[in-house]
Image (spheres, helix red, strand yellow):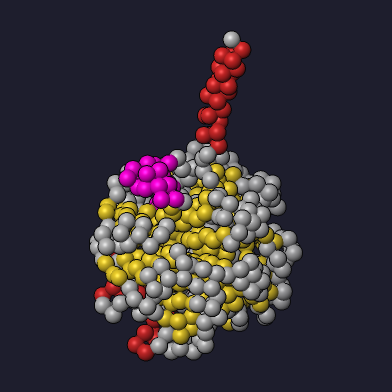
Amino acid sequence: MKRRFLFLAILSFLLLATPFVMAQKEWVTISESKWQASFNDIFFVDMLNGWIVGANATILNTTDGGKTWQQQPRQPLPFQTEFKKVRFITPKLGWVVGENGTVLKTTDGGQEWVKLPTNTRVALLGVSFVDENHGWACGDGGFVMHTDNGGASWQSQDVGTNNTIEGIHFMSPQVGWAAGGGGTLLHTKDGGNDWDFQTSATVNTLDAISMLDDSTGWAVGAGGAVVATLDGMNWQVQQSNVPNSNGMPEPIWDVHFFDMNIGIAAAEFGVILRTMDGGTTWTSLDYRPVACRLQGVHMINAKEAWVVGDKATILHTTDGGETWDVISNANELRAVHFKNDKLGWAVGLAGCVIHTNDGGNTWFPQNSGDVFELFGVGFVDENRGYIVGSNAALLETLDGGKNWKSVSDPGDEGHGRAARIQFGGDMSWKSAMACYAMSFGTSKNAWAVGETGKVMHTTDGGDTWKGVDIDTGFAGFNNLFGVHFIDANVGWIVGFAGTIAQTNDGGMTWKITSGFAELQDVYAIDPQNAWVAGNQGTIMVTTDGGNTWIDQTVPTQDNINAILFTSEKEGWAVGDNGTILYTSDGGVTWLKYHSPTTNNLRDIVKSPNGTLWIIGDSTTILRY
């Protein structure tokens, strides 16, 4: 009886414990952006009450000075219009404008928003209200409209140009300015019945205008343009001194001044400009807290300011712009690498690099020094690592990512001036192409593949990189998206048009096949067994070293972006819309696994201790 009782007790415990154990084996969200939209504008009506607007009908509100931000309205809006500008005249009364002639109004601080009739489908890019009745909105094709009843009805105004009016700012019901395409600057003294052209001293499009009073103001725009007026009539060019990240001056998207001297401007590629002398001298912040487009800026006082931009970016400073806190940023992660159980790196678009030194519990940004797309990352040891990306990017760190520097020369255009990157003969032009993936077969042997058949290889841990011509035929010019080497000799490359290239001799010779589906990733567990994954739910397997490939049945049509096998039988694949697939029989049967996200998933890896990691859009990081 005692034995039977003990057996039943143990059985009961196991039955109770099993669901608990199984419940623990789920994908856990470590990181994911709270918001999934690009932000276009930010406005504070006082020190506590502020609003942010952006894509996907996004409206955010703070009532505590930015400590917390909440989505508005209470019920989601029944449309996905992109909002461009927001203005409030009291903590309760405000307006939002956007695409398709959209104007929204709130009288309760944004708890409820009412869509106003405008009788236009023009994309509205700017709005200005001076009181509860008098307001103006502007947009494409020289469009300006006016209301004298708070937006209940609108009348268009003839401004005398077809240039897009990007920004508008009124100081009173009579006096206002507008700015736009081709350096257009317009001024009215009668509420917009008549508009006069003013000389802006630039032909660059002016994307924003900010007037401090009836005579003092600034306008900013394309090509790093900044113009200023001290009398409301005559405008002079100011030297913005913006960087040239892509070979030309960064466009400036917004500007705001606290007083006659102190102002901040927001620009492309994460550039933030500051002036302490009314714009006589503009300087750009050396360190960019993010590298994406910054579209809106608002100064609370001389020390505190907010900036918003693409990829759900919210930045905040309390020291006049010397340093910025990243309140929100939805990084589009593309690749992840763990050198050991503690040290990991993930890279993505807009020069994003994030790092963990505690096994993935916390991640913090590193400054890549690059503002473009980063697609692959790998490390030789705990300190020495490499990143590849667009614009021929090859970045190197010798101190674990504290400092990254470029090994390549993006301005080289394939002329071979990057001493450590050698593409000889007819392949020299490929050195200027992008790389889309990287794989370390050993600590010294690494491969990177990319645009128009670009393949490069290092055998000395990154000291030198050599171009490899895998095929002089059609496959040699296909974009290559995935690479996996299991040692110094055996590796696989996949890409456009179903390209699959395999080598057993370290790249001396290649066996190449092609199909139809675009392939994004490849994973091999030995020279005979490998899987490839790609668009429209494609997964194929070979068990004979690539001589034959067999389609596997997959329960999704979503693009599969990455694949990983932990053994000959157990494997994972991830893709668009949060897709996670699992197999325990080598892919004979693939099943959908519960996913905690709907964001596109881009890469999956295993750290040495067996922990699995998935990364993707909107700073998504999952752990299993």
**Residue span colored magenta:** 567-593
Position of residue 309 measured from the top left corner of the image (x, y, whole percent) = 55, 61
Query: In what quadrant of the picture does the N terminus appear?
Result: top right
Give the residue displayed 40% in from the left and 88% down from the top: 424
Which residue is rendered at x = 55% and y = 69% of the image? 443
Relative horizontal placement of residue 592, taking residue 610 as reference (left or right): left
On the question of residue 515 being in view, the answer is: yes
332 and 466: which one is in front?
466
| Residue 624 x/y as whole percent | 53, 45
Q: Is residue 60 above or below residue 243?
A: above
- Looking at the image, which residue is at 49% across and 89% down? 417
301 above or below 46?
Answer: below
289 with respect to 104 (left or right): right
Residue 592 is one of the magenta-drawn residues: yes
Residue 278, magenta (yes or no): no
Would you say residue 44 is visible in this rendering?
no
Does residue 159 lie above or below 7 as drawn? below
Q: Position of residue 577 (x, y in %)?
A: 41, 48
Percent coordinates x, y for residue 210 in the rendering: 59, 67
Judge by depth and name the residue closer to the eye, 96 or 502. 502
| Depth order, front residue of 515/440 | 440
Q: Quadrant of residue 563?
A: bottom left
